[in-house]
Amino acid sequence: MISSPLSDWGIYIHIPFCRSRCTYCDFNTVTGMGEDDYARYVEALLLQWDRISKMPSGHVVSIFFGGGTPSLLEPEYFKQILGAVKDKLRISLEGVEVTMEANPGTIDEKRLREYRRAGVNRLSLGVQAWQDHHLRRINRTHTVLDARQGVEAARLAGFDNINLDLIYGLPQQTLAEWEESLTGVLGLEVDHLSLYQLQIEEGTPLAGQLQRGRLRVPEDDVSADMAELGRKRLIQAGFIPYEISNYCRPHKHSRHNRLYWTLNPYLALGAGAHGYWNARRWWSIRGVKQYVDNLQNGGDGIAGEERLDRLEEMREYIWLGLREEGGFSRRRFQDRFSVSPEGSFGVTLGKLGRQGLVERRSDYILLSRRGREMANYVFREFVTAS
Ligand code: SF4
């Protein structure tokens, strides 16, 4: 079991620019921007960082540049941002996981070397599928060849911690094609793989295509088979399943994601980014232009905040903890909330236990195999538990 001390915290930095919009995407991203927009945005990020007056105590263990497509920004910007983080916190980045999300087709070896020199030490590439026709259909701008070349370039540039994202349940995708995707990414011998089920978000072009009957996504049982096949193939290949969608080589788990799953603090910079600390959740202004204008006019970029009461925190702790392969520790729950999980959620835990969806293994409460297949149902039970 990998554990995150409560004193560990992280920083998420949102880079909202993309070359074009994928049909399924509902992230906070914009297209059609250029160098001037990038420069103004990075200035705003630096201002927002500068204006944060209180920091969690403890250690920064992760800085994560997510998007959007962070690899559209020049490496120099990463140097500036990471330099500002080091200066303000008076730390070195030695031992800190610094991840950059990137899209194949936006990177080459030279550029990747510069990102490495700027301080980025973990790369997360959105490969998504291993068939060009699927990539085109969801409007990705890269090809399978770009993905292969991207990983090769990253290795040559010195990255020894690479994640690839894959999506299953794509429109018209067959189980055989999914297996081909798994074989393809396994052949690249990376350190970490994330397998996500396609989510159909309202208002996206994909949702419209499905409503009009132009495309179909695989039935639920086929998607469940895809998830199980992914798990089997990756475990056979020596990957450790450590979260419901995530697999790693030994010691190569994502430190950043673990902060989220264990409800550790994380600060957030950038348009629409969410932070969490001390039972407070806050979010920055979502519109890129409004965000930049706010900071240039002396604001802090924040759009709103909410306080989580104790019950909400306990619920989150449990359903996020259940995402992890080993579940969550009853002792740590008790230490944090001064009550046992059964003391707070005995009815829900009892019901899910009788349904065979959660089980107890020594100090841990975790999802059973069937619970993994019905994970969304289990999580919902805790989101609404009283
Ligand atoms: S590259 Fe990622 S963030 Fe950009 S549009 Fe596609 S899915 Fe969304």
Image (tube, rainbow, N blue to C red):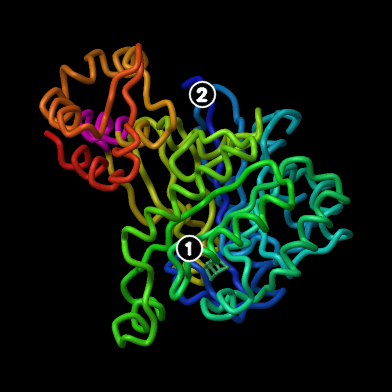
**Mark 1 to mark 2: distance in Å?**
36 Å
Relative placement, left or right, of 102 versus 1 is right
Q: How many marks?
A: 2
| Residue type beneath disc 1 | Leu
Whether label 1 lies within 8 Å of ligand 1 gets the answer no
Q: Nearer the viewer, mark 1 or mark 2?
A: 1
Residue 238, position as x, y percentages in the image: 64, 35
Callout 1 secondary element: helix
Assign ligand 1 to one image quadrant. Answer: bottom right
Residue 287, position as x, y percentages in the image: 45, 69
> Which residue is found at the position 50% from the left and 21% from the top?
1
Mark 2: few, some, or many residues within 10 Å (few <14, many ≥20)?
some
Residue 101, position as x, y percentages in the image: 64, 55
User: Which residue is most to the front?
Assistant: 176
Callout 2 secondary element: loop
Provide the residue span drawn in magenta.
Answer: 308-318
Relative placement, left or right, of 318 versus 81 is left
Specify the label residue 175 is tagged with: 1
- Residue beneath label 2, please? 4
- The one nearer the camera, 213 or 125, is 213
Q: Earlier in the sequence, mark 1 or mark 2?
A: 2
| Residue type beneath disc 2 | Ser
Asked where in the image residue 199 lies, by quadrant, the reply is bottom left
Relative placement, left or right, of 77 versus 297 is right
Q: Is residue 181 above or below residue 7?
A: below
Specify the label residue 211 is tagged with: none
Question: Is 367 within the magenta?
Answer: no
